[in-house]
Each structure stands twice: as structure tokens, then as C-alpha cells.
Amino acid sequence: MLKTRTTPDYWIVAAILLLLTIGVVMVYSASAAFAYHKYGDSFYFAKRQFLFAALGVFLMFVVANIDPQKFYEWAKPGLIVCFVLLLIVLIPGIGILRNGARSWLGIGAFSIQPSEFMKLAMIVFLARLFSKPGYDITKLMRGLLPGLLILGIAFGLIMLQPDLGTGTVLVGTGVALIYAAGASMKHLMGFAALGVAGFVGLVLAAPYRIQRIIAFLNPWQDPLGAGYHLIQSLYAIGPGGLLGLGLGMSRQKHLYLPEPHTDFIFSILAEELGFLGAGTVLILFAVLVWRGLRTAILVPNLFMSLVATGITGMIMIQAVINIGVVSGAFPVTGITLPFLSYGGSSLTLTLVAVGILLNLSRFIRQ
């Protein structure tokens, strides 16, 4: 029996609002010294993060109340728009170059990252494709291959920027969705082998990626070069202990640890709030994944289920990779931590994705 809920999943809402609150506080704490040094305003990044969080929450609740059929209808045009943006961003003079990657479009302080839009658009499009009546994903040529081809083209365009971190999240999310759709394990294992070979090729093709792998295996071999980020991150996490050094008391944020308010914000959180603070964030992510997967299981149709699976998988994969990187479990990839790291496009689009998840949670079977 289907039952439409008048309100979305409160567990998801509570987890998101708590993560956002922690995120704004930690962005301020992690960036205050750098922001004052560079802009003369210790609240420079915190104010922007709060505005993006407020905008994202507003959009999240707007999306949570849209007719779910609209997502199905917008899937194809949304994907086309994202492909066009990925092509435009590669044009010199139009795409903005930051940290060696041409990943941004915009004017002045306002800019967007098209690859962030593509992650969400790809989830909704693949969910629509695989949920079509009569579509058999267990077939290789007419089932699995079309979805993988579209996913591969998007990954290729993102790699031309280049942005291996975002590309990895995109592919990981797509594969999780394809698995949930019922693809043949024999086919998936075959493409996984090709994917591993391709990933190795991408690493070998770029010297800086090889240096990251070497630094991951032994950061002390080049402590002032490729291993610097990881060493400084571990110097932040280690002293945190059980209760941390205290909010605002981080030492590593004082121009020792690069990107303390973006990629490595979890390191500063662990340093200042200790194991209890870091554990609280992990629990909140676990709650979000639990309720997201519950929604995916209990919604009334395959399209809704695949969308919920993809959104939950995207958040989980990105969080696992980021926390793995800052703790030394994975090589440095440049992936931000959802809801906590500073960043307008990523935060806003992730909150819109959660809005879709909240929308679907209103239609679960009772």
C-alpha cells in the first residue's frame, strides 16, 4: 500500500542541518587566520559559506515539494545542458583556471563548476534510462553499454579539465547505480577490469599523479613536496586526541596545512574537536546514508529507487574518499567533504540533491 507523507524524512533533515551548522562553524575556524591575512576579514569565507548554505537549504525545501514526475521529465534536457557546460568550460578564455584545472565558469566572484551539476544530472538520467518499461540492463549491447557510454563521455570531458577527483565520484556513483539497477556481475567485473587498467593509465600519464601515489605510500620521502599535504594533515589529526585542542585552537590552520577550509577541513575538525567531534560527523553521515538507502528500498517504483540510491551513493563516496585522503587511507585527490568544506557550487548542488531525496522520502511504502 502506498502512502504519501505530508512531511519529508525528519532524520535526513536533522542530519543535514547539523552537518551544515558544524560546517559553517568549522569553515570560520579553519579559514579565519588565512582570510584575515589575505582579505583583512576573518569572516570572509564563513559569510559566503553561510549564504550558500542558506540558499542551498531554501532550494532543498523547494525541490522537496516538486512533483517527482518532473525529475523524470527533466532528466534528458538536464543532461544535455550539463554536457554543453562541460564543453564550454574547456574553451580557453571562457573556462576559469584554478589549481591547474579549467573547471569553472563565471564572472568575478560568482562562478559555477559544471562537473558538480553533471553528477546530479547523470544520476537522474541513468535512473530514467534503466527504469524504462522493458529496458533490460542485463543485456550488454542494448542494456548496460548505452549507460556506460554516456557515463564514459562525461568522465572524459571532466578529465580534459583535468579533475580526477570529481571524475572518480561521478564514475563511482554511476557504477553503484548500475549495480542497483540489476546489471550482470559478469559484465560489471569485465568493465571493472578495464576501468582499473584505464585508471592506472591516467595516473601514469600525469607525473603529479604518480607523485601523489608515491607520497601516499611514503609521505616522508618528500616531506616538503608531494608528501607535504598528508604530513600536515596527520599533524593536525594526531594531537586532537579524544576531546581536541578546543574550537579555534588549531595550530595547523596557521598557514601550515594547505586548503584547511576546503579539502582538509576534516583534519582541522579532528584537531580542534577530537575523536568525539570527528565521530559525531561520521555518525551524521551514517544516519544520512541509512535513511537514504531506506528511502531507496521503500519508494514505490524503480526510477525513484535508483535516484535515491544514486544520490545517497554520491554523498557516501565523496565523504569516504575525502576522509580517507586526510587520514592517509587514500592518495590525495582534491575532493571536498560534503556539507562541511567551503564551496558554493558543491554545497548548493549537494543540497539540491538532498532535496530530491527528501521529496522521494514522502512516497515510501508503509
Image (cartoon, helix red, strand yellow):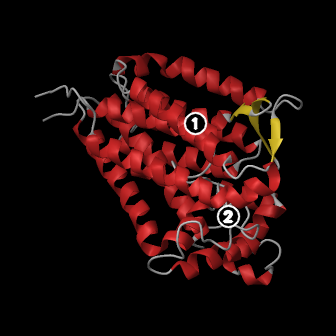
Name the image quarter holding the C terminus.
Answer: top left
Residue 189 appears in the picture as rendered: no
Residue at horizontal 53%, vertical 67%?
247
Q: Residues within 10 Å of mark 1 (few under 14, many from 20)?
A: some
Q: Is residue 14 above or below residue 104?
A: below
The amino acid type found where label 1 is placed reads Leu
Name the image quarter holding the N terminus.
Answer: top left
Residue topped by disc 1? 51
Q: Is residue 200 above or below residue 23?
A: below
Quadrant of residue 132 in the image? top left
Secondary-structure class at tag 2: loop
Residue topped by disc 2? 332
Q: Nearer the viewer, residue 148 or 309?
A: 309
In primary-sequence order, the first of circles 1 and 2 is 1
Residue 293 appears in the picture as rendered: yes
The residue furthest right is: 93
